Amino acid sequence: MSNKFILITGCSSGIGLDAVRELKSRGYDVLASCRKPYDVGHLLQQGIDCIQLDLASSESIQEALCQIRDHGQLYALVNNGAFGVPGAVEDLSRSALQHQFETNVFGTHELTRGCLEMMREHNEGRIIQISSILGGLCLPMRGAYNASKYALEALSDTLRLELHDTDIKISLIQPGPIESLFRANALSEFKQYIDVENSRYRRLYAGVEARLSNAKPVPFTLPASAVSQAIVHALEAKKPKIRYRITRPSQVFLPLKRWLPDRWMDKLLLKLGDKPAK
């Protein structure tokens, strides 16, 4: 890996930050990115190379791509930067969906295209997409996030087929519940984009807010290091897996979706969805 490096997005906390620390401890040259200048400065103080990158801004992405090229030979891209806008599909405005897709799909895609161009210069590389269990099945009240992860999976599957004659490998990681700030950030998005008082789902939203406000881990939650280990395998394996299912829910429910009739699966997923607060 001499003069080669790995770019990871969304490194202010959670999966991204843990992956940076894990890979650096293994001797990799890692370039992290964060959306907020404060978080960039915080990582720089820890001795981590970091650039500012806002996936919702094409201008920011293009500026970052110049810095990425100047850093050396890009070997791997870990697309981790993402967030969720909770809410019923019926209550999602056009602007809410655009906001969700700007980062999780459009910005991620633009960055991937720019990085892929660099990888093609050496005909080698790894693109590791941090997807979700919700890239393979849908839970209610998560429609925008579900759709964004399904889109990421479809683009990744297509790209993998198109790169079949290169040494550029694509892997998708599908975590279930992971220790992170995802729920806290989702609560902020929920309050900004969902008009609770005028919604027919008002009673159910009390349960959504209670879930997002609860810092206690849900059952089967794993530390971010579980995802980092999958990232390491996707980087180092001669034939990396196409999909890595992390946490018991991903390992159980994603295969179930392939075999159970759709209506049976619907009943199961409805039981797992949010309930009205008591």
Image (cartoon, helix red, strand yellow):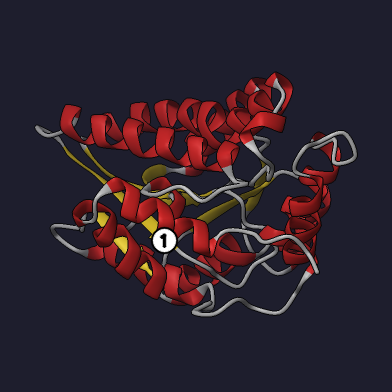
| Dot 1 amino acid type | Leu
Count every numbered label the image shows and give the total. 1
**Residue sitting at x 58%, y 35%:** 67
Quarter-of-image position of residue 252: bottom left
**Residue sitting at x 81%, y 36%:** 199
Q: Is residue 73 above or below residue 179?
A: above
Q: In the picture provided, is 274 more to the left or to the right than 112?
A: right
Question: Does any portion of residue 86 appear in the rendered image?
Answer: yes
Q: Which of 9 and 27 is in front in this view?
A: 9
Q: In this view, does 95 lie above or below 135?
A: above
**Residue sitting at x 44%, y 68%:** 227
Disc 1 crowd rating (10 Å Cα; few below 14, some 14-19, many 20+) is few
Disc 1 target residue? 268
**Residue sitting at x 38%, y 42%:** 73
Q: Nearer the viewer, residue 197 or 175?
A: 197
Instruction: Label 1, secondary structure: give it.
Output: helix
Q: Is residue 104 above or below residue 273?
A: above
Give percent across and percent down for residue 140. 56, 48
Give percent across and percent down for residue 72. 44, 43
Q: Nearer the viewer, residue 177 or 161?
A: 177
Quarter of the picture holding the N terminus: bottom left
Q: In the picture provided, is 147 more to the left or to the right than 182?
A: left
